[in-house]
Amino acid sequence: MAEKKQNPEYEAPAIDWESRAYWEGAGRGELVLQRCRDCGVVQHRPRGLCASCLSDDIEHFVSSGRGEVYTFSVVRQNQMPAFAKAVPYVISYVQLEEGPQLLTNIVDCDPDSVSIGMAVKVDFVPTPATNGDALGVPRFVPA
Amino acid sequence: MSFSGKIAIAGVHEYESRWAPDKTSFQIMGECARDALADAGLGLSDVDGLFCATMTMGAMGPVQLAEYLNLKPRYLDGSNIGGSSFVSHVAHAAGAIHAGLCDVGLILYGSTAASDAMAIGTGNSSGKDPSAAFVTPYGATLVSSYAMVAQRYMHEYGVTSEQLADIAVSTRHHASLNPHAKMRNPITREDVLESRVIADPLHLLDCCIISDGGGAVVVTSLERAKDLRQKPVLVRGTGEAVAHREIGAPDLTTIAAKQSGEQAFAMAGLTPADMDLATIYDSFTITVLATLENLGFCKKGEGGAFVENGGIGLGGRLPVNPDGGGLSSNHSGMRGIFLVIEAVRQLRGGLGARQVEGASLAVAHGTGGMLGQMHSGATLVLSNS
């Protein structure tokens, strides 16, 4: 499991009612995005209302999980213990097919092989269950 | 009705030491208040507006600071928009004074970031709350957030590591002329490129230093400033802006400085070409390049050519950060107040080897927060007549 060495173990994310569907989806292996039923905008990160028209008529849907690297950096120094042992690792904004960008890691590849425009697809890591919640953290791998 | 040209900066002080393990941040602010008020020829009893932000004060920071200084101001502003806060505080003070809400505004900052060994750039950037959960798991450091902007600049516009390195080289040269600067030994482009990579493509010497420090700025009406100790420096234009992860596809190379700069120059009735120098928040070399482009000193994509080979050094096309900036002089976590202080000192003149000869117009621009994630921008246009 080479990719495990490139990343720290992910802790269970802090969630609230605005973000629960996203992290529960990740626990099922689904990248869940929001679409406004009034204005049609797809948004990320999730909110309790549409940040474009303030409608609260929001629906959730499962993203294709495909996108490309918009930008990235190879992190070679991080003084937080959990990440210090994971360097070098890749932090990136991935441009999703559905429009939004999300901040994530690119794993399962040589950090020096990552480039802008590279095709990537989502991958998930389950996080420790807390209070019965089966959550996960999405990250990306070369497509 | 604009306050442009009717408000003045009458006093400034920069804490001289970069290492103050025996001081508290409040003590540093108190000493800076004393020395900036003395610089202006005023006393603590003249202050009726208090403006402050620090990395460690609580939500009632201005109230705590007023208690510490035994002040009873009639106008309080503790707005914290990151390291740019103090540039915006000048605008807020100008507005308050112009509206008659106070007469003398005191802006304060103090920090012991270095002696507290704060991991500002290479610690994780977010806490444990549901909104931070979209950042925290991934190990995004502050350096890497700026690095992702640099990577995008290189991809879109062909900016090179050599061009970014030249920003650090010019700034270090300026620091070598400033007896108070923390890092004064000259460096070369090769030194920057050979320093270790912290987060690609940014090297150690592309990053600001960490120091202790603090500062104070005294703002009042031009009418009142005319009778004070120093020649007034006029507030000609101000602007503020926020940029963030927009819904959709944000452009990481368009930063808050574009909006705040346009507003500040419009208020001043001036253009970037009129400026004799700039003080720009140089958290990283890329911050300077992105800010120069977005303020309009050159077109998008021309920032690399603008900064290379001493273009922003003393004697270059636009001297930037003649005090040595955050890259080499001081960076105690929130650097905005030093941008204002150095711009004022340059417009007063008499700085010796680092003086921009004949400087009469300056722009200060602070970036707060993180380029690449969410950040604020505050721009200030100043003149000495």
Image: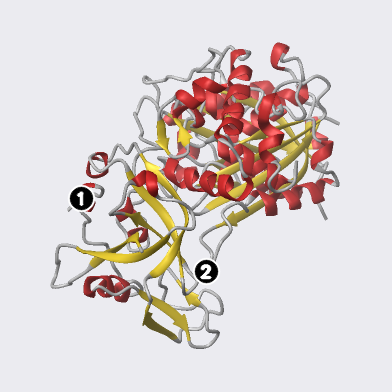
Q: Residues within 10 Å of mark 2 (few under 14, many from 20)?
A: some
- Identify the residue position indicated by label 1 in the image: A2
**Foreground: B159 or B75?**
B159
Residue A133 circle label:
none
**For residue A81, which quarter of the picture?**
top left
Q: Amino acid at mark 2?
A: Ile
Residue B247 circle label:
2
* Chain letter for mark 2: B
Q: Is residue B19 above or below residue B218?
A: above
Whether residue A59 is visible, yes or no, is: yes
The picture places residue B344, in percent across and down from the top left corner, at 71, 28
**Foreground: B49 or B247?**
B247
**Foreground: A105 or B110?**
A105
Q: Residue at x 82, y 28 (%)?
A: B360
The picture places residue B78, in percent across and down from the top left corner, at 53, 47
Q: Is residue B361 left or right of residue B124?
A: right
